[in-house]
Amino acid sequence: MKDSVENKPVALKFSGYQKFVVAILAFLQFSIILDFMIIAPLGAIVMPALKIGPQEFATAVSAYAFSAGLSGLLAAGFADRFDRKKLLLFFYSGFILGTGLCAISADFQMLLLARIVTGIFGGVIGSIVLAISTDLFPLEMRGRVMGFVQTAFAASQILGLPIGLYLANSWNWHAPFVMIIAVGTIVGVVIALRLKPVNMHLGLKQEHSPLMHLFKTVAEPRYLLAFAATTFLATGGFMIMPFSSAFTVNNLGISLAQLPMVYLVTGLCTIFAGPLIGKASDRFGKYPVFVFGTCTSIVMVVTYTNLGPIPFAAVICINVVMFVGIFSRMIPAQALMSAIPEVTKRGAFNAVSSSVQQVSGGVASVIAGLIVAQEPDGHIVHFNILGYVVSCVALVTLTLMYLIHRSIHERPVK
């Protein structure tokens, strides 16, 4: 069937088990995304607590990305040689271990080590989730699947970030990681007991050598285009997010006590937007929705990064619209690129894509740390420059995604 079916009404219904899979993958993403996202809003607390500056903090953030990128690349050759459920449980157990190290970190060096360990395991999980989603759902349903799975991003804001910030403000910055460990353990047990094996790909012919499997994946021209798009897609979030809380508090005049409410309201709005964006992607086409998200994101990112002190309600409204734009890029992009790899290369493709995403994001985070600076009074300067850089990168990504959309439209996909 062809990608043009996107423009027709979708009538496919989720089965009971498919609903369970979507729900458990969403909860899984919730814990992974929360672990990554909690670092950014904790920046305003962690930096003074550990007596570090923006450069050191950006290094801690990027450490996760670089280690995740390396592990994703190393795992790619083996990603299609195991039951995806077993692979998921292995890496998820390691992720919980790394999060435990974050919970006991007492200085910058220990935090850096903990983020490296967490990245080694946690960075691969997203690619496994995408491979499972692609294996179990046809293209016509993947917009909705990605929409629901990506609501974990908003759910981490609604439940995770406000609770995490409350715990950090009430006790210390280690407390949110203890919360993640508790949630992750429950999710891991449910996956072990209820998720069926995902191993249909094991019955298909594959390369004998894992190294050759990796080589053929990274050498495929169609995949290279997707990896390039992934590289630019990752740039925006890794540049803006690490300093968003410090910028909101020190530049926009929002207090640490009000900060959880910003994430709460923003997440509450975007958690409803995710499934709607997914449905729109299946109904109207993934690329048109991506175009909408890109235009919205550019306008809001430039606006946000040039703000000064503004009312609390205005901060919330700007954040809501900006995240709707971000979701309108993430969801259709993931759904569209899920149609690129063959069944026997889905694990490797997603692992390499995740690796590229993490490494490029880590580089972007380091670059962002070099661009911005923090004045003695806490004021973040040069943040608007990041907004312009992110906007230019978004335009490049728009072109690359068009080429991907056209290539999928011109060949049969599954």
Image (cartoon, helix red, strand yellow):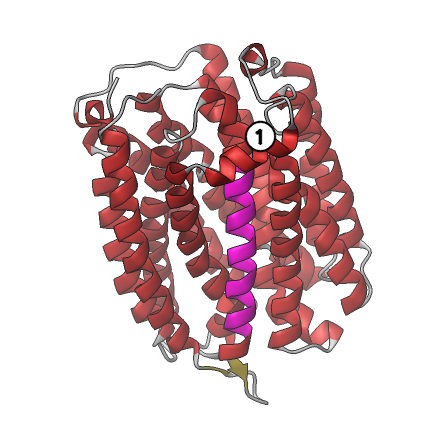
Answer yes or no: is residue 3 visible: yes
Foreground of the two, 206 or 145: 206
3 left or right of 306 in image:
left
| Residue occupying the point 59% across, 31% down | 212
The residue under label 1 is 213
Please give the name of the residue rendered at 52% of the width and 71% of the height, measured from the top-left corner.
367
Q: Is residue 151 above or below residue 343?
A: below
Q: Residue lying furthest left in this view?
A: 8
- The quadrant where residue 414 appears: top left
Q: Position of residue 360 (x, y in %)?
A: 51, 57
Query: How many marks on residues?
Result: 1
Compared with 347, 94 (above or below) is below
Is 80 placed left or right of 317 in the picture?
right
Q: Position of residue 93 (x, y in %)?
A: 74, 34
Out of 57 and 398, give the one closest to the viewer.
398
Quadrant holding the N terminus? top left
User: Secondary structure of the magenta portion, mostly?
Assistant: helix
Whether residue 22 is situated above or below residue 110 in the rendered picture: above
Q: Residue at x 72, y 54 (%)?
A: 116
Q: Is residue 360 magenta?
A: yes
What is the crowding at mark 1: few (fewer than 14 residues within 10 Å), some, or many (at least 20)? many
Provide the residue span drawn in magenta: 350-369
Measuring 37% from the left and 27% from the top, which residue is drawn there?
Answer: 142
The answer to whether residue 255 is seen in the rendering is no
Q: Residue type at mark 1: give it.
A: His
Residue 204, percent from left and from top: 53, 12
Is residue 19 rendered magenta in the image? no
109 left or right of 155 in image: right
**Which element type, helix, strand or loop, lies under badge 1?**
helix
The percent coordinates of residue 119 (x first, y second) are 67, 49
Q: Quadrant of residue 374?
A: bottom right
Residue at the farthest bottom position:
376
